[in-house]
Image: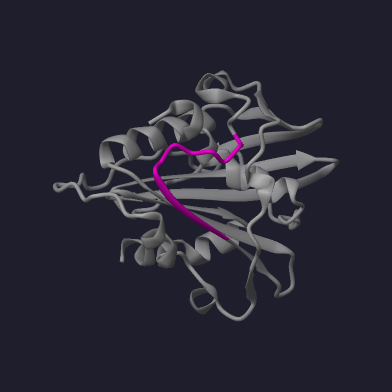
Amino acid sequence: MNRRASAALSLAALVALSVSGCAKDSSAPAPSDSAPAAAGKPTVAPKATRPPLSSAALSERLLDESDLGQSYTRQATSDNSRRDDVTVIGCPALEKLGGDGAAGGALNFPNSAKATFSYTRGSDSEVAEELYSDTVDKLAPGTRTVFEAMTGCPLYQVVVGDAPIAISTQKLPAPALGDEAWSQLLTLTSGGRATVMKQTAVRAGSVLIVVSGSPALVDTHLTRAVDKARG
């Protein structure tokens, strides 16, 4: 897998939500210094290699309104996740993977599907789901490299056009789901507004599930997203 493209995996959804102004819930608590930090660790190694799923098959496994409830509305696909004018500053590991393309959304995983939902009950929060599929020998190390790079940089900056976004990261305990899992808490600061977001990724065989957005919404829907993605 092209590592330059793979860096978009962990940044595309986050930057798209931030730039579009959709993730507006800045009332979430800031990460605690005493919170445990854990890198993504494999749980049970797969004994059989499953073939990748097509993009059409992945689309059918995305969460929808019937899974989430009537307080959620699916958003139209935005072009904000596909930009060329994005640069990563202050995180050598991510810059090495491909700084100016890191948040462009142009992944080299052959198959993917994405959906973003707004939550309208008492807040302006959103939750986004991304599904990717490739052979395990490409999907697993590619994802691992990106998340280790991101969580290895406690503070860095993403510049979108001429708008800087300061990002601080904190590792979180990985959920006991799938074959491998990673989780992180990020605080994105732009224009004087701080947005706390959570991102958790779970690899289940040849499918990668990435859920990003308001921490409470990610926690609420992660297990259902993984179960549905696994079929």
Residue 30, visible in the rendered structure: no
Considering only vertical position in the picture, is 213 above or below 231?
above
Q: Main secondary structure of the magenta part?
A: loop
Does residue 106 belong to the magenta stretch? yes
Q: Looking at the image, which residue sits at the far right? A: 192
Q: What's the residue at 66%, 32% (across, down)?
A: 84
Q: Which of the image's four quarters has the N terminus?
A: top left
Residue bounds of the magenta highlight: 103-115
Q: How many marks?
A: 0
Considering only vertical position in the picture, is 102 above or below 188?
above
Corner quadrant of residue 69:
bottom right
Q: What's the residue at 66%, 69% (across, down)?
A: 119
Where is residue 200 drawn, in percent x and y? 48, 49
Where is residue 95 drawn, in percent x and y? 57, 21
Where is residue 157 drawn, in percent x and y? 69, 29
Corner quadrant of residue 156:
top right
Q: What's the residue at 26%, 36% (across, down)?
A: 137
Considering only vertical position in the picture, is 32 above or below 24?
above
Does residue 23 belong to the magenta stretch? no
Residue 106, visible in the rendered structure: yes
